[in-house]
Amino acid sequence: MKRSILRIAILGAMLMSTLPSRGTAAASGTAKKSFGKTPEGEAVELYTLTNKNGVEASISTYGGAVVSLKVPDLHGTFEDIVLGYDSVDGYVSDKSYFGALIGRYGNRIGHAQFSLDGNTYTLAKNNGQNSLHGGIKGFNKVVWTAKEIPAKDGQALELTYASKDGEEGFPGNLNVTVVYTLTDSNELKIEYSATTDKKTVVNLTNHSYFNLVGVGLGSGDILKHVLMIEADKFTPVDAGLIPTGELRAVAGTPFDFRKPTAIGARIDANDEQIKLGGGYDHNFVLRRKPGDGLALAARVTEPTSGRIMEVWTTEPGVQFYTGNFLDGSARGKGGVAYAKRAAFCLETQHFPDSPNQPKFPSVVLSPGARYHTTTVYKFSTQKGREVTIHKSPSH
Ligand code: BGC
């Protein structure tokens, strides 16, 4: 292609990304339908939030999971870009945490144990010797109470759950509220808050698995997606994927995503940390200062569809996981088998094992204080080249 034509193509693409998407002009609003029942007979609902551009997010009251997320590509064609199941049954037997809310503690706590004020708390071991994602019955396996609430700039759904003192071994009655807002600027905003009546630890996140091509048959792996993470350091792990406590520079390692790089470029590198994770399964230390508020954490671009996803968060870390443990045994929406590296996760969080790592930012919540964090997944499109968008999401 001649230079001038190329320039016009880029300009055209840039212009298209600012125009309203084609696609079916669905009216914005929130719809609710039955998603089935839990084995105990509890009714589960599926709420579908639609914004003025036709972007759609479906959220299940079981696990508060994002079941589907339909966003346009460069040509206005909508695809569902998250892994999930067609009904609640899939989520009941799921072991991969597709789309779910994670709590009380996102990621691992070493030896399933921690101490607070001289008391030792023992948690369920559901991942070797460790506790993972809240235990055997984490927040991903409970039915949340849902309420549609007004939002200035889109559609919002509030989910609440009261976690009992001692649940999965954690101290304190914890009242949790999560608000999902689908904004008219094509953002899925998640606000987490919690209060406790006894000192405890909290680390909430969402475990969506993304493939920006779409998650239907033939979508393939995510190795050609291009990723940038705003992190100079990451937390290396031991064989049980528990952080060693070191904050290691990403420079000169396969963990350097400071410049946009294909996810697959170094995923099989001859590197001790890559081998331990079976690919990427690591917490990145976001480049941020206290008081930064909502800041850009990561940007993923998918070159063929032109879809771009940015992750903004108030959290200090993000777990980048490349679906290394997916093995095709999970049959998702439409019966599609989800294979290894069919999707990636960017789970905003405090660092894994923080309750046992005095040098990591604290995850302790005391009575009278309020846990409050915000994460925004922002979608846009652009063709052919990397873009820098530093406009803060609406919040
Ligand atoms: C963890 C992985 C785990 C995955 C699904 C990620 O957050 O870091 O090790 O396999 O969640 O459970």
Image (cartoon, rainbow, N blue to C red):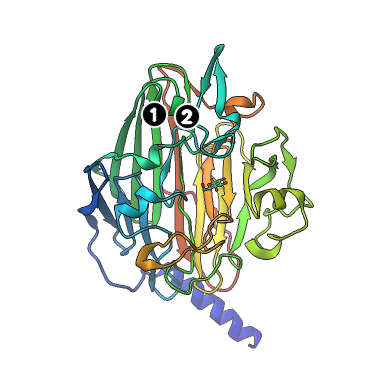
Estimate the x, y position of residue 318 in percent, counting from the top left: 57, 44
- Label 2, label 1: how far apart the Cα atoms are: 8 Å
Q: For the C terminus, which image quadrant?
A: top left
The residue lying toward the viewer, choosing from 109 and 292, is 109
Residue identified by numbered label 2: 202
Q: Tell me: 132 left or right of 175.
A: right
**Dividing the picture into quarters, in which one does residue 63 lie?**
top left
The residue lying toward the viewer, choosing from 260 and 178, is 178
Estimate the x, y position of residue 27 in percent, counting from the top left: 22, 63
Estimate the x, y position of residue 350 in percent, counting from the top left: 55, 35
Q: Tell me: 66 left or right of 321.
A: left
In the rendered view, would you say 190 is above or below 330?
Answer: above
Which amino acid does the dot numbered 1 rest on?
Ala
Residue at the image position 68 percent from the left and 53 percent from the top: 258
Q: Which mark is residue 194?
A: 1
Q: Tell me: 155 left or right of 76.
A: left
Judge depth for marks 2 and 1 and give the one in front: 2
Residue at the image position 74 percent from the left and 59 percent from the top: 269
**Dividing the picture into quarters, in which one does residue 357 lie?**
top right
